[in-house]
Image (cartoon, rainbow, N blue to C red):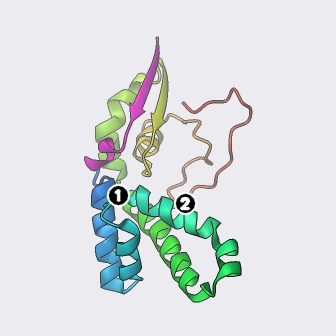
Amino acid sequence: MNLLIFAGAGTSVELGVPAMVGMAREFLLHCQQWNVEPDLVERLMSGELDIEYLIESLDKICEAKHPLQIIADVTSRLSSVDTVRSEVEWFVQHMAERVTRGDAHLMWGAIIAACKAHDITFVTTNYDRGIELAANAGGIHLKDGFEQFSGSEIATWTGFSSSTDYPT
């Protein structure tokens, strides 16, 4: 039997990772607490409490950096955008690391165990590695495009070996 499991952001809430609105709120509080351009963050969110919206806005500004510098003296303001972009990347990564191996195994263990008897493909939009942690605990290697999980915070992207090597 072939199965496709789609795990959206909501599945990670049970593992302690806030959804996009919650993550945006926590990021804004983080920026206020540590004085990381909180006014800029608030302006960029412009009422959209969604971390993805913020990241997309920051990326658009970063992509337009060169043309903006040509038409105006905005170098100092753009360095603030770079600061926030770096901080949000760090923040999201650390939010995703709230997931513990034990909790991930409790949530995903039975499904991971079923991988031994069935052809299961996982698709996820999550930032966390809950599924990967559970698979590692269950002795299943997922082809997710990253090097084998070693317990470190950051896994190196290795890509896929061919166009037919889809994640499992």
Viewer-proximal residue, 85 or 127?
Answer: 85
Q: Is residue 57 above or below residue 3?
A: below
Q: Residue at x 35, y 85 (%)?
A: 34
Amino acid type indicated by mark 1: Asp
Element marked by disc 1: loop
Viewer-proximal residue, 13 or 52?
Answer: 52
Q: Position of residue 85 (x, y in %)?
A: 51, 71
Q: Position of residue 97 (x, y in %)?
A: 40, 59
Q: How many marks?
A: 2
Mark 1 neighbour density, 10 Å: few (under 14) some (14–19) many (20 or more): some
Q: Which one is closest to the eye, mark 1 or mark 2?
A: 1
Amino acid type indicated by mark 2: Ile
Q: Which residues are magenta?
A: 1-14
Q: Earlier in the sequence, mark 1 or mark 2?
A: 1
Element marked by disc 2: loop
Residue 131, image quadrant: top left
Q: Is residue 122 visible?
A: yes
Q: Position of residue 125 (x, y in %)?
A: 44, 43
Q: Is residue 135 above or below residue 29?
A: above
Q: Which residue is mark 1?
A: 50
Residue 73, image quadrant: bottom right
